[in-house]
Image: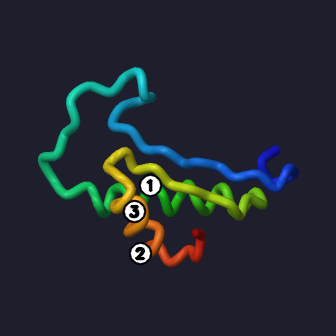
Amino acid sequence: MVAAHDAAVIICHVQGKNVRDVGDFNFGSDPTIMLEEYFARQIEIATRNGVDKIFIDPGLGFITATWLTARCGCGIR
């Protein structure tokens, strides 16, 4: 439906099964690799289904989202 309407999708990440299940954040280790792998999988699914306007929200702030988007090499802005 997103691709059919030339719309955008926001791919979010939360620590928990859903946003209502999030408790205290676990910052015990660097989440960068896990987030990069998670978003790479989600971006691949979206692009495979014709979506080319993708925003990511790692739940850690805008700078992290910008860095992950640039690092994944997906060319999505």
Q: Earlier in the sequence, mark 1 or mark 2?
A: 1
Q: Which amino acid does label 3 sit on?
A: Glu
User: Which percent across, then down, holds residue 12?
Assistant: 49, 44
Dot in front, 1 or 2: 2
The Cα–Cα distance between marks 1 and 3, rounded to whole angstroms, is 6 Å
Determine the residue positioned at 39% across, 56% down: 62
Which residue is disc 1 drawn over? 38
Give the side of residue 10 with respect to residue 17, left or right: right
Determine the residue positioned at 17% across, 46% down: 27
Give yes or no for contact between labels 3 and 2 (Cβ–Cβ under 8 Å).
Answer: yes
Name the quarter where the N terminus is drawn: top right
Query: How packed is label 3: few (under 14 Cα within 10 Å), some, or many (20 or more)?
Result: some
**Which numbered tag is attached to residue 61?**
none
Which residue is disc 3 drawn over? 36
Element type at mark 2: helix
Element type at mark 1: helix
Which residue is disc 2 drawn over? 71
User: Which percent across, then down, holds residue 15?
Assistant: 33, 37
Give yes or no for contact between labels 1 and 3 (Cβ–Cβ under 8 Å).
Answer: yes
Dot in front, 3 or 2: 2
Q: What residue type is labelled 1?
A: Tyr
Residue at the right extreme, as displayed:
4
